[in-house]
Image (cartoon, rainbow, N blue to C red):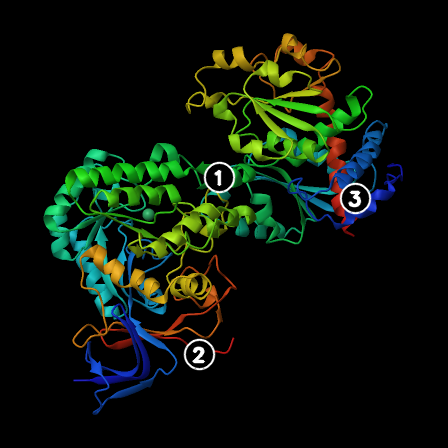
Amino acid sequence: MTPAITPTVPERASTQGKKQHLLDLQEWSAEEVWALFETTDVMAQVMTRTIKKVPALQGFTVGTLFFENSTRTRLSFERAARAQSADVISFATGGSSMSKGESLKDTLRTIDALKADLYVVRHQAAGVPYQLTRWTDAAIVNAGDGRRAHPTQALLDTYTFRECSPGFDGFEGKKLTIVGDIAHSRVARSNLRLWTKLGAQVTLCGPSTLLPHELEQFPGVTRCFRLEEAVEGAHAVMALRLQLERMQKGLLPSLAEYQARYRLTPEVMALADAQALVMHPGPMNRDVEIDGELADSERSVVERQVANGVPVRMAVLYTLLVGRQ
Amino acid sequence: MRRTVLQNAHLIDHRGDHGKADLYLRDDVIEGIDLGGEVAQTIDVAGAVVTPAFIDLHAHLREPGQEVKEDLRSGLGAAVAGGYGTVVSMANTTPVVDEPGLVTEMLSKSEALGLARLRPAAALSRGLQGKQLTDFAALREAGAVMITDDGEPVKDAHLLRRACEYAAELGLVVQTHSEEPGLRQDGVMNEGLVSQRLGLPGNPVAAEAAMIYRDCEVAMLSGGRLHVAHVSSKRGLQVVEWFKAQGAPVTAEVTPHHLTLSDETLEGFDPVYKVAPPLRTHDDVAYLRNALIRGVIDAIGTDHAPHTQAEKERDLLEAPFGIANIEVTFPLLYSELVANGGLELSTLLDLLQGGPARVMGWQVPTLEATRAADLVVLDLETGRRVAPETFKSKAKQSPWTGQVLKGWPVMTFVRGKMVFEREVLSD
Ligand SMILES: [Zn+2]
């Protein structure tokens, strides 16, 4: 039997009712993000119980719509939905049938006949979650669109910092350093938006070919080509996965040169704040962008990031679905 | 013999404003002003401007092979609804217009339609492959008026050089779609702050400016007439201006969308704004607008590029490039640049009439007796909403949907025959 416990949602959650979608984080205020963290606390507590299920979303149907494969993210969302007793329909659409000739609108209309209340969307092209909002009444959660945004990843990264940073006292005055292929990274874009929204400074680090100068025009963001300088005094350092095909595209001379200049090591981390956390959105190329030992060290919160994925996504689904009623 | 009179017409052509008069047409030519005598048809156009029909040097009519997007009937129908009497069609069809038989076929088909006059462009290279020149002389013989691989830049500078040389000998204009492929890469919008914000692959201004520079150098080297299509950026146009100042045999056109829209329109992720070359920044738009006033742009070419609704409802990486605009070009530019923008009506008209004619070495159209009775009647007063569902074009989508514009063509005459009349509906 499922214990009939509805998570107690903090008072501030009522303001979340206005939020229809989670497309990116610009349209969410800092207060709404803090409220979401509090909802996440409740969800995280649910996930520590013997029976990890509440009836909060009973009667709701969540559709996962992954045009680009990502088993990890899809399973995390599906777990988040089922843990709240929502029904889940999973559309594995990677590649074939829909890519050729069919418009997004037609694809969505076909799927929408199944009447899901919320779609979790992953697509290789930026903007698709936005486009879909035009053609359905359902709520849309962006689970990663092209290079643009991956808001639940940024939410779980900031949530993890809030949880794990020793003596956490807010994001004001904190420095996040993101290292790697910023140009192609939706994780970097969503994180720099969210951390700066919450009051932190963000330093982007990588070779200039992967570090677009325009990003420096974002408030609170600086650009730095030297890893040591970028990491100095940082409170969190996030290494991004390096796509190995970047070499072929002429964006990097060689893997060896990248590793020599940008691999995150314990030596480099010694320059960071004494309490600094090491983060990685996964999946990791061990010893490419991050030293294997560092990834397993005490500073590393990589496992907490993974663990927080489900409660954060539970909170997002809850906020959007129950908040809409 | 058949005579028609357009009564109370406000006559304007590139020679000037001729005030109100009755304009007489005889068969397919203009007969004269205030002649009197018996007529078969009397049309009262009081309050409207009558001026030579427009010439478009750059439209994608999609026939043969892509009739799902547009065909000669819908495309030339859209053209006359936009006040155009002559249209140069691009050759990037399926098959590519790279052999004389296709030119002949398109011409006879369009003659039978009796809409706008079709003046086909032929491909520069066979199959637009950028490898081997097409038979320019035979294509010209068949009726092709321009040589262009538009849709694709000419990657191989040597091929462009030989094309310019050969075209010069035959009196043909070579038109280029100037974007350096290595810099353009897989860009789907202007590279800059907005593309970084949106996480969409960018196509930098440098791709256009560098290629215009190369193409103009090739034109100077070869002595051939080069027409640079759809210049979209300040830097791109500055290169053209620099070459013009050197006396290079170069002309350039801009499109209605590059004169009115910026890259920020992509913030809503609607592929209706996806076009090549891409919409640039406000700065670029302002520079292009100012350049019209300064007289350094030779012509406005629509780059009318229709696609199906389904194609424009794909994601931004997959959706095809192109904006269908030939039906709204004049009202759009009249409303934004003349009524609210400080451009003289006479300048705008010249960019749509005399400008394109001079680029091609054609006679500049006027309202003088004996000249072709290709005319447009413009209502400069009534505001009408842009309603793509009423377009003659098969592309029922527009960046300007819902915008109220003035300056709509209400009638278009080609060869003395009324080929378009706007339904007068109160809006
Ligand atoms: Zn073109």
Camera-side mark, 3 or 1: 3
What residue sits 44% from the left and 79% below the top? Answer: B424
What residue sits 25% from the left and 39% below the top? Answer: B215
Residue B77 percent location from the top left of the image: 33, 67
Q: Secondary structure at mark 1?
A: helix
Which chain is home to disc 3? A
Residue closer to the observer: B300 or A94: B300
Label 1 beta carbon within 8 A of ligand 1: no
Mark 3 vs mark 1: tell me if same chain: yes
Q: Is residue B122 left or right of residue A230?
A: left
Q: Is residue B250 above or below residue A236?
A: below
Kind of residue at disc 2: Val
Q: Is residue B82 above or below residue B9?
A: above
Q: Secondary structure at mark 3?
A: loop
Q: Earlier in the sequence, mark 3 or mark 1?
A: 3
> The N terminus of chain B is located in which quarter?
bottom left
Q: Which residue is mark 1?
A: A96
Q: Which residue is mark 2?
A: B424
Residue closer to the observer: A89 or B88: B88
Is residue B140 visible to the viewer in this orientation of the structure?
yes
Mark identifier at residue A57: 3
Q: Is residue A32 left or right of residue B33?
A: right
Kind of residue at disc 3: Leu
Q: Which class describes the residues within 10 Å of circle 1: few (<14), some (14-19), or many (20+)?
A: few
Label 3, label 2: how many angstroms apart (C-alpha)? 55 Å
